[in-house]
Image (tube, rainbow, N blue to C red):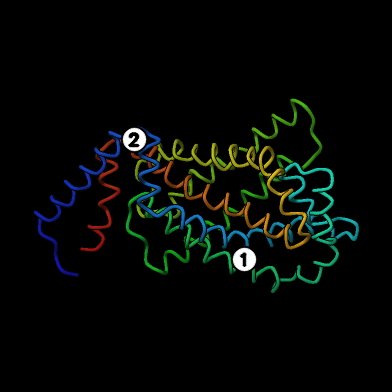
Amino acid sequence: MGSVSHDEVRQHLSERRRRLTESRALSPVKAVMARFSEIDGANQGVLVSVQLFTVIIPLMILGFSYFTGFAENVSPGTVWIRELGLSGPTSDTVRGAFGDTAALRSVWTVVGVAAFLVWGIPMAVMVASVFARAWQREQFGFGQRLARGALWFAIYLGMLILRERIAYGAEYEGAAQVLMFLIALIPVWVFWSLTPLVLVRDGGHGAKYLALAGLAGVVIDGIIVPVIGRVIFPRVIDAWTSFGPIGVAMAIMTWCGVLGTAWVITACVGAVLWERSAPTDTVLQAQTAEDGAER
């Protein structure tokens, strides 16, 4: 590519510094809202939610079916009944809509599971695009996006399994249940702290500040979303389950919309927290590193 003059580099750096100063001058909430609007967060959340519905939901159901031994008397709907704290007629409707896990035994093959895993890579590439925009970085080339997206997706699945085993691996009550829920947040924190490192160009700059950015994922994905799921969503799902199995599907799709939007918000909050905690020179160096890579 053509060379870039020293004046152009200085002008670009000055522009980056101005934008950073303006962002830091806003309140944290306004800064996050501005970043969310800048990256068209609402539409991004919808796109991510569709990928979640077609990739993560089938994998969760298959994983649950495998760990229960594809039993004939166990419904994959138990995943949602447990996750969202459903009970009564609503839980019965959800349980009935999924049938039993025995029917999924034929899908638990190398080809069957690999199909969903491969389909998860485009989802990871899309999430990488969201993070690149939220963190104000140039995106990687297609090859790196594909490789990094696959790595991120593998880490995400590992985090889901680990959190599930910690939080629901045994029957806990009272204080023990609260304690295990808090311990299950540790892999969530690690995952969201590593996400910029994996998906964002020069995401390792200011590495020690990534732990603070990762707290955004803990609060949003690890606490707020589960609370919404257990406190608010059962009332929402009641309105859908009267339509039977199609209503259950639409309710889960709605829940995926909540998760997809939460991921986009997490990207914006993490980026804003990192930019405010890391030294100015570190932020500018990371955000302008792609210029040097292109020259």
Along the viewing direction, whichever of 40 and 294 lies nearer the viewer = 40
Q: Amino acid at mark 2?
A: Arg
> Foreground mark, 1 or 2?
2
Mark 1, residues whose alpha carbon is within 10 Å: few (<14), some, or many (≥20)?
Answer: some
Residue occupying the point 14% across, 65% down: 3
**Quadrant of the image containing the N terminus:** bottom left
Residue extending farthest to the bottom is: 111
Place of residue 176 in the rendered image (x, y in percent of width and height, measured from the top left): 75, 28
**23 relative to 218 in the view: left or right:** left
Place of residue 60 in the rendered image (x, y in percent of width and height, measured from the top left): 70, 57
* Quadrant of the rendered image containing residue 33: top left
> Relative to 5, does residue 263 appear above or below in the rendering?
above
Choose the circle earlier in sequence order: 1 or 2. Answer: 1
Image mark for residue 276: 2
Query: Could you say whether the residue bearing mark 2 is in a helix, strand or loop?
Result: helix
Q: Amino acid at mark 1?
A: Leu
**Quadrant of the image containing the C terminus:** bottom left
Residue occupying the point 17% across, 52% down: 12
Place of residue 159 in the rendered image (x, y in percent of width and height, measured from the top left): 61, 48
> Relative to 140, does residue 202 appear above or below in the rendering?
above
> Relative to 111, does residue 291 appear above or below in the rendering?
above
* Quadrant of the rendered image containing residue 58: bottom right
User: How far is the residue under mark 1 from the one under mark 2?
Assistant: 36 Å
Residue occupying the point 29% across, 42% down: 283
Q: Which residue is mark 1?
A: 117
